[in-house]
Image (cartoon, grey):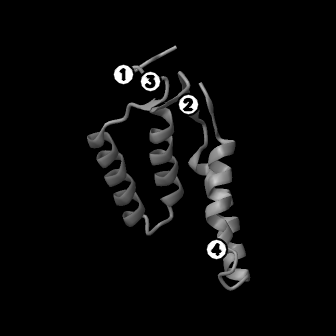
Amino acid sequence: MEVKHGHSSFFDGGLLQFIGWSLIGMIITVFTLGICYPWALTMIYGWKINHTVIDGKRMSFHGSAIGLFGNWIKWLLLTIITIGIYSFWVNIKLEDWKAKNTSFA
């Protein structure tokens, strides 16, 4: 069991890493006019999860941008069809997708 500072739950990512990943994600999203947003999302979320330890167990994210992209298109179409009403559920669906693709290493 890995213990840091006497705690069995911690986050070991650094600020400069977070800034770097966020900037890369933002640049990729802007230059692709939002098409690669799912990739940026999975990249940043994966970094956060892979640097998280809960009760001495490191977490692992195994979601892919391609897996999210299919859902993203479906959610976009449902939002358009429902004149924006489905957008209230998109964050919940995204959190569900993240949870389904997160486990302990």
Name the mark nearer the viewer: 2 or 3. 3
Mark 1 or mark 4, which has the lower sequence index? Answer: 1
> Picture coordinates of residue 95 (x, y %)?
63, 54
Kind of residue at badge 4: Ser
Does the residue at mark 2 contact the one at mark 3 (Cβ under 8 Å)? no
Mark 2 or mark 1, which has the lower sequence index? Answer: 1
**Label 1, residues with CA under 10 Å away: few <14, some 14-19, many ≥20:** few
Q: Give the SS element for disc 4.
A: helix
Name the mark nearer the viewer: 2 or 1. 1
Query: Quick check: 3 above or below 10?
Result: above
Q: Give the SS element for disc 2.
A: strand
User: Residue at the location (73% across, 81% down)?
Assistant: 81
Q: Relative to residue 37, is residue 78 drawn left or right? A: right
Q: Which residue is mark 1?
A: 5
**Residue 26 falls in which quadrant of the image?**
bottom left
Mark 2 or mark 3, which has the lower sequence index? Answer: 3
Kind of residue at badge 2: Met
**Which mark is drawn over residue 87?**
4
Mark 4 or mark 2, which has the lower sequence index? Answer: 2
Q: Give the SS element for disc 3.
A: loop
Query: Quick check: 44 above or below 82?
Result: above
Q: Which residue is mark 2?
A: 59
Mark 3 or mark 4, which has the lower sequence index? Answer: 3
Does the residue at mark 4 contact the one at mark 2 (Cβ under 8 Å)? no
User: Residue at the location (49% across, 60% down)?
Assistant: 37
Instruction: Count the marks.
Output: 4
Q: Which residue is mark 3?
A: 7
Name the mark nearer the viewer: 3 or 4. 3
The answer for how far apart the CA atoms under marks 3 and 4 are is 39 Å
Q: Relative to residue 44, is residue 85 drawn left or right? A: right
